[in-house]
Structures are given as C-alpha cells and as structure tokens.
Image (cartoon, coloured by chain):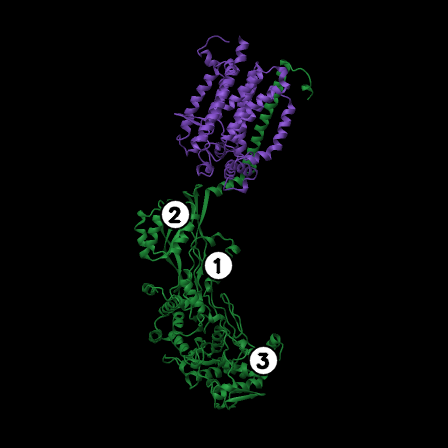
Chain colours: A purple, B green
Amino acid sequence: MSGPGIVPAPLKQLPWKLLLLVVAITGFGLAVLYSAAGGHMKPWAISQGVRFLLFLIVAIALSRLREEFWKQTAFPTYVVVVVLLAVVELIGKVSGGSQRWMELGIVRLQPSEFMKPAIVLALARFYTLLPATELRSMHAIWPAAAMIAVPAGLVLLQPDLGTATMIVVGGITVMFLAGLPLRLFVAGAATLAASLPIAFSMMHDYQRNRVLIFLNPESDPLGTGYHISQSKIAIGSGGLFGKGFLNGTQSHLDYLPEGHTDFVFATMAEEWGLLGGLFLIGAFMLLVNWGVRVGLRAESRFARLAAAGLATTIFFYVAINLMMVMGLAPVVGIPLPLVSFGGSAMMTVMICVGILMSLDRQPRRGRIG
Amino acid sequence: MKLFGKRVITDATQGFVFTRRALVLGAAQGGVGLLLAGRMAWLSVVENERYSLLSESNRVNLTLVPPRRGWIVDRTGKPIAINRTDFRVDLIPERLTDRDKTLAAVQRLLALSDDEMQRIREELDGAAGFQPVQIAENLDWNRYAAVSVRLNDLPGIMPGRGFSRFYPDGAAVGHLVGYVGPASAAEYEKAKDPLLITPGFKVGKEGLEKTLEPALRGKPGAKRVEVTAHGKIVRELTTRPDISGGTVRLTIDAGLQAYAARRLGTASGSVVVIDCANGDILAMASMPAYDPNSFSDGISHDEWDMLSQDDHLPLLNKVLQGLYPPGSTVKPMNALALLEAGVGPQETVLCTGAYRVGSGLFHCHKRGGHGMVDMRRAVAQSCDVYFYHMARRLGYDPIARMARLVGLGERYDLPVASQRYGTVPDSAWKKAKYNRDWTAADTVNASIGQGYMLTNPLQLAVMAARIGSGRMFAPRLLATSAPPAAATLPVPAEHLAIVHDAMDAVVNGGGTGGRARLQVPGVLMAGKTGTAQVRRITLAERRTGVLGDAALPFRLRDHSLFIGFAPADVPRYAVSCILEHSGHIVTAAPIASDVVSYLFDKDKALARLERLEAEWGGTIAQRMAAQARAFRAARHPAAAVPDPAEEDAR
C-alpha cells in the first residue's frame, strides 16, 4: 500500500464508491419518504434515516470480519434461525393467528429476514465441504434441498409466500453456481411449471386472489386489483420527468395504497418519472453487479458462492418488488430494500452488503500479503 | 451437457464452471434490469397519456351545479312559472359521529316519517365519504331553522338552499305550463347527460315546461374539486357558474288566465280567449286541473289516485286534447258557406220542428218549430231545420271547405306536448275512412255540428277569431317575436257583416245567447251558443218526452258550448267555452261573457266572481283541498284529521 497518509488505513480500505452508491439509493429513498409524508420528515424519513445510519455502521463492522468467521458461523447461524422460525410459528399457533416476528422488548425480530443471507452462507459452506467428486451424486442434492425446504416450509406456514420464494430461489442460485448438472435445473423448472396448478390449489384464498388479480388486474379495479391498478397509474402518469417533487397526486391523495412501503417505487416514479426510475434501477443493478464481481474475483470456493448468492438475494428483492409494482408479478409483499420504509429489508440488504465487503477484503489482502 | 459427462470433476473445473455460471447469472440479472427499465418506459412514456387521464380522474371530482330554470312569464312579464328558494337539509356521512343519535334528532326536528328514515338509512349505507345524503327538501322556514340553530349538536348535518319550481297561480295554469320533475331513467338512458341525475335537477314533464325544455334548462355550472381516495375534499380547483335558462314570454295574460280558470268554477270545461288583432292566445284554461306545484314536489299516492279517478278528468288538458261535437256553434260558419254558395240571406225555410230525410226524421231543438226563418233568424234562434234544408240543397262538401278555412280540423303549430285536432268530415274523408258513400243523413248531422264532426276548444276559439276579424290568424302562444302576418279570410266583407249581424242577434237580439250579454256598458258581444248531444235520443224517449239533464247521469248529459267575439262591431277578442256534460243546468254563455268582460272591466268581473266562489265553497285551492280531505277521509276512515295548517299554506 502507499505510504501513511492522514486517512487511517482501515478507513482508506473501505470501498467508498460502493458506500456512496448505497447512500445515494437510501438518500433518494428518504426524499421519497419525505414527500410521501406530505413534505414532512416525520413519521417516516427521519426514523428511516436514523435506521440507515445504524445499519451502515453494522455493515461496516461486519466488513471488518474475516471470511473465516462466516465460514465457521454459517451452519450454527442457519440452525439458530431455523429454530427461531419454528419458535415464531409456535408462538403464532399459541396466540391463535399468523405471526412473523417476535417481540424482543425494543426490537421486533423477524427471523425469516435473517434466513435470506443465512441460507446462502449455509449452502456455500455445504458445497465447500462437499468433495468435488461428489458433485454429481445425490449427496450433492438432497442435503441442500432439505436445507432449503425446512426454512421455506416454515416461512410458508406463516404464511409469507414472498419470503419463502426468496429463500428458495436464493438457495437454488447457490446450487446452480456450485456446479450441479444443468439438467437438474431444467427438469426442476419443468416440474415447477407442471405443479403450478397444484400449488395454486393449496394456496390461501388471499394468495390465490392475488395471483388471479395479477393475471387480470382490471377484473377487480376496486378490490384486490386496486393495488396494481393504482400503482400502474402512478408510474404511468409520471411520464418522462415526473410530476415534480412533492407534487404526486396518487400518493398524496391516498389513491396509492402502501405508498411508503411496498409501493414506494410508484410514489417515486410519479414524482420523478422515468428518469428517477432509471436512476434507481441502474443504481440497484450496479450494486448487484458489484456483488457478483466480488464473487468472480474471490479465490475461495466459499467466498465465490457466498458473494454471488448474496448479490442475487439483493437482486431478487429489487426484481420481485419492481415486477410487482409494475404489474409483472403478483402482489407478494416484498419491499424495495433501502427505499421502502421499514427495517427488515434494509437490515437484510445491509447485512448482505457488509458480508460482501468482508468477502471482498480477502483476496486483496491475499494479494498484498 | 458434454462437459458434465462421466468425467471426474476437479477443483479447477469447478472454478471454471462457477465463473461461467456467475457470468450467466450476472447477464440474466442485467437482462431483468433492462426488462424492468423497458417496462417502466412502456408505462410512463407509451401509455403515459392513458395513465395521466386515469390519475386526473382519480384526483379531480367534477360536480355539476344544476342551472336555475328559466322563467315563464305572461305577455306583460308577470311570472307564471318561477323558481323559489327552498330549504333543504343534507347529511355528510364522514362527519357523522353518532349516527343513530343524529338521525333520531333530525327525525324529531323535521317530523320525518319512518319511510323517509328508512330511505335515509339505506342511502347512508351506500354513501361514500363526502357525498351528501339528502335528508329532506322543500322545508318550511320553521323546520329549517329548528335544525339550523342546533347544528353544534348535530355533526354531519348540513342545511342548505336550493331552488324549486313555483307556479303562483297553481292549478289555474296547470294544463298550460305542465310541471317539472326528476328525469326518469328512460330520459337519462336516451340523453346520457350527467346533469339529469344530479340531485335536485328537474326537467319539464308536461305542457310548456316539457316543450320549452331546451330554452328553459340553461347550462349547468361545474365545481372541480380535488378529492382524496376517501372522498375528502382537499381544495376547490375551479368553479364555473351556472347559466340560468332563458325567460320565455307567453302571449297569455296571466290575470285573464287565472280569471278564466276560476270562473269555470265546479264545472268540467275549458275557456280559450284569442286576441283578434294578432291571433295571440290570451288564455287557455282547462278545469278542473292538477296543481303543478304539488306535481313538481312529487305527488302523493292519494293525490294521484284522486286526480285519476275524478270523472271531471283533471289530468286531461281539454283545450287541446278534448274533442267535442261543435253543435250549433258551427252555424255562423255554415251561414258563411251558404252565402259563398249563393244562398241569399233573405231566403226563408219553413221550420215545422222536424225534417224528413228518407225514412229518418230529424228534429229541431224547438219542438213546435220556428215557422218561417231566414238566415239571420236561423242563426239567432239556432234553427236546425233551416240548416238541414240548406245543407242538403248545397251538399256538405262546400261547407266542409269553409269549416277548414276558419280553422276547424286544423293542427296548429304550437309548442304543446300533444294536440288532438278532430274531424271535419266530407265525402272524400268518409270514403277514405269507412269506404262508404256520403249520405243525406251525414249532411244533415254535420250541418248542426254533430255526427262525425269533432273539434277541440282551441279550434272553436280560432273559428270565432277568424270569423270576427276576417283574418286567417294562426293561434300563437309564444310572444318571442313579432306576430306573423295573417292572410285575409277569402270571404267578401258583406258576407262577414251579415254573419256578424246574425251573431249579434244571438246575444243582443233576443237569440239563444242572451245570457252571454256583456255587463259592460257600450260593449256588445256577438256569439253563438251550442249544445252537443252525447247520447242517442230514442223514438220511445221522444214520445214520452226527452229526459231533462238533471235526470241523467253525468256522462250522458249534453255539452254546453259558446263561441263569440267582442265588441261585436269592431272585434277585439274572440272566446270559446265548452262545459262538458253540464246539460242545461250551467251553460257556457255566461262564463264566456264574464271572461270577456274581465278584459273590459276587471273590477266588476272580479267582484262577480268572488260572489260566485263564495257559493261554490271557496277558491280553486280551497275547493281542491276540501276534495282531497274528503278523498282521504273516505279512503282512510281511521286516519287522523289532516293538519289545518296545510290548507292555510295554499
């Protein structure tokens, strides 16, 4: 490294461009929340900002950990989160309703959120341990499948189709990257397509409704299709440059439901137009791309699988949410990370970013050392 | 894939596979990113117009402000139909705090029926946010004030003012102007105008209100407001004031119209007065009538049943829709036709009281006969045999030509909803209609305005005006522009003078119309009486003596008719009056006389009327209220005595 400067070495080592990107996305999100509250910092923008600073510190702290730490804790973390999911499910059963979180005094803990990075790390660890020669045997498949199925099943019981989907696709992504035979995935996709009608028949009424409405939102413009219709109106009416900051009518006049949470992108698009949308989509793609490139340049198998998997977790967050608000996917309740008001998604994504930064330090250190 | 064949997979190949798959994954992610950007561009650029429109229709709520309806005024500008401010109370559902308590208080204060409360509750259940629900309209000041002063205790209640149609003369103008009411579903289906379903908006339903609708309606105002998804109004954007409908001036003289309606009294009949100078209709009253005020407010079941069951037909505008045999009132017209055909006024006919045509015997109204009659005496004494004889000599077709010339059988160009124009029969008509030849009996019947002949009261007035003035005036109802020029009646002036003289004799020369003599010094009325028979008098009845009208049921009694003009020497006003089934108990002549005398001496005519009304049991409104009370009492014997305040209000 270059000689000692005024900036301390740990600070200098931080990936500033990446942090700037994350701050830019969140900052833009804060502006949208400020507008969504009718031009006020309260109740959303201020607490979201404070929360972001907190998670930013957490992410930087995580980035100081070594790859070895993630390797060692991957399985224990996974087990703990699965237990927490089971506990939440039991609490829900006892209190007689569905529950996704547990109250821990000041913090409301939602274990399913932790499962998104945990499954990626656990599977990465699993394939690191698996001898390369076993990759084509059943031993490469069934433990991984079980590791995905247990938490996904528990989350589905809550019921939270969106999160369960993300756990499944996050896990499958790692299996794909690990080098399992391609025909497995082709066959899996075919099976999935064939089993869709069965899955549909097993869904809860509200889930089934969402799928039906997604397929034909105009069939119920004032009922369940209202979300999608109003969201498309907000985005479509924004045009190229939007209606202007604080001038969105769909959000300010309450036509757009969940305008500060799941449908925050529509709130943004109404006021900032296609320009704002391209900025956000571009920024998220850069973030995901950075994550994938961390994996590409990593040297250990664990770091490669984990980095690419975590990047894909962030990607799925963004992609599912945007497809939902633009009417390309059913309403599944996945927020837009860093932008939507709420701590869970932000926490997950910032943990992912923290681990990614941590994994990214390894090869450089290696090069230097 | 070949790469994954049976080969041993080493760590190195694993790294290679990862890199390849990670690149594929990255590319796929980039592809999804592009797809999302493309989708967004599609929504916000290609479909921008559509979604902008949807967003605007979300945001902006357009409420129509119903235009104030144009006035209908008489020839001097006196109001016939105007708008009265009315008090109303609405309810804003979103502001309600305790629904049951508020509704109970409102019911008590406004004295609302349980039916009304049921309606309000139903509308409340279906209402959203700030859309007001009507509690009551047309409130009197006391009830309105009772709610207004308690507003603090009644959250959500909104008192307000609106407009309702008001006809100062009530039933006297009922058939003339018609009434207004909320547009029907069919009307909305046809026009698709959102104004029609705006609360409080009314359209013309009958009479002039209906036919003059385009002129009276005006243009609605609009209030554009920004509303939230919950219906809460954020701010007013723009307000366009309504443009009230135009005022329509009629040729009617409101005072005369009211007088004519009142003067008809308890009879079922009609009076028409036409200005002989220009054809203006000064009055066209048909009685009994409905009160357009109660129709415009929404009529009760009892009132409707009472009107529709009445044998005096208060729902029928007899001036335009009543068809009657004109009877002897056609005799002056007959005389004109005879003169035209060369019959000398001095030629006489011996009246023996009956006239034989083939095997049939036609009687004169005077049993013993009139003896020798010339034209003047035939008209003055209304001798039937003279006209039987002369019409047979001439044939009826030339007389029918004259009948049409003076306006019978004609459909006038008037802004009225419907007009029945009757029949002037002749040989061609009978051939076309019944495919039978005209007979001598037909001629004899038509010569005294019976048989196939049918006219409406307006046609009779037009006939009187044309004979009186010698001009072919078309009747006019709208005083919107200068009256059109009228051609001269193609009849020599000396013929008209002969007929005028005979009609003068009817009233002032010892003729049948003595009771039509005007009570105005220096003004003489010229006219002709008529009696139209509605039943066949059998030979048996003739032998035993024709039954008096008092002995007959209402439906079978004769109609009494009168046509005339005054002053007799320089005709200024023409009048027709028909009393249905009045027999000879009440006759048309004195009514026509009083109505015309109103035009020359208002005070005396009114004084006479007031004396008569005292005999009849009060004014039109008082008599109608009494009738309604009696009807209700007969129908709901147990019901309480109606509120006397209701009568006083009229």
Q: Residue furthest front?
A: A94
Q: Residues within 10 Å of mark 2 (few under 14, many from 20)?
A: some
Label 2 to label 1, Cα distance in Å? 33 Å
Q: CB atoms at circles 3 and 2 under 8 Å apart?
A: no
- Number of numbered discs on residues: 3
The answer to whether B494 appears left or right of B586 in the picture is: right
Q: Amino acid at mark 2?
A: Ile
N-terminal-most mark, 3 or 2? 2
Indicate the position of residue A187 as horizontal and vertical percent values. Answer: 64, 27
Indicate the position of residue A325 as horizontal and vertical percent values. Answer: 52, 34
Q: Amino acid at mark 1?
A: Pro
Q: Quadrant of residue A312?
A: top right
In-front residue for pair B134/B455: B134
Q: For the residues carrying marks 2 and 1, which lies nearer the camera in this image?
A: 2
**Residue under numbered circle 2:** B92
Q: Amino acid at mark 3?
A: Asp
Q: Are marks 1 and 3 on the same chain?
A: yes
In this view, B604 is above or below A345? below
Label 1 to label 3, Cα distance in Å? 43 Å
In this view, A321 is above or below B120? above
Label 3 to label 2, Cα distance in Å? 72 Å
Q: Secondary structure at mark 1?
A: helix
N-terminal-most mark, 2 or 1? 2
**Residue under numbered circle 1:** B214
In-front residue for pair A71/B157: A71
Q: Residues within 10 Å of mark 1 (few under 14, many from 20)?
A: some
Chain label for disc 1: B
**What residue lies at 64% left-to-right and 19% top-to-bottom?**
A136
Q: Residues within 10 Å of mark 3 (few under 14, many from 20)?
A: some
Q: For the residues carrying marks 3 and 2, which lies nearer the camera in this image?
A: 2
Chain label for disc 3: B
**Residue under numbered circle 3:** B397
